Amino acid sequence: MHLNGSLIGPATLYPGFSTPAQPGETMVIFANGFGSTSTPIVLGSSLQSGLLSPTPVINIGGKGAQVTFAGLVAPGEFQFNVVVPSSLANADQPVTAMYNGLTTQAGTLFTVHQ
């Protein structure tokens, strides 16, 4: 999603609600399953937080993206603030995250358009 909370995708996906990401833009990605954080998880708590260390490696369109934040923001929910590489072409670009020797599944795409 865009930093303002609007959806990333082709403008035709949800007309009036989705727009492509732009090269150089910071976008937000949510995920789960990344493991322990800098702050211990409190069992049963509805509020969770903590940073991931090391920072995951996120690639968009096969290019390394700058990760400006990587942490737990809710029980089981991780947030990554990622800068879209400026050299990407207009297209649906694949996105992967690598952490602790594991890579997320293929098939996740973000629409990028200048």
Image: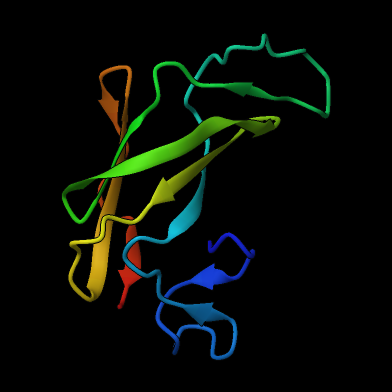
Residue at the image position 54 percent from the left and 84 percent from the top: 14
Residue 30 location, x and y as percent?
53, 46
Q: Nearer the viewer, residue 47 or 25?
A: 25
Q: Examine the rendered structure and indicate whether residue 28 appears above or below residue 105.
A: below
Task: Locate residue 11: give its quadrant.
Answer: bottom left
Q: Total label count?
A: 0
Assign the C terminus to one quadrant of the image: bottom left
Relative depth, front residue between 47 and 3? 3
- Residue positioned 83% across, 29% down in the render: 46
At horizontal 52% and vertical 79% (from top left) the residue drawn is 18
Residue at figure coordinates x 51%, y 35% from the top left: 69
Q: Is residue 36 left or right of residue 43?
A: left
Residue 40 in the image: state x and y as whole percent: 67, 9
Horizontal placement of 31 versus 66: left or right? right
Compared with 54, 56 (above or below) is below
Q: Position of residue 87 (x, y in %)?
A: 18, 62
Q: Is residue 73 above or below residue 40?
A: below
Colour scheme used in the picture?
rainbow
Q: Is residue 5 above or below residue 52?
A: below
Image coords of residue 33 (percent x, y): 49, 28
Please identify the residue farthest to the top as the structure is shown: 40
Image-quadrant location for residue 92: bottom left
Judged left or right of residue 72, residue 54 is left
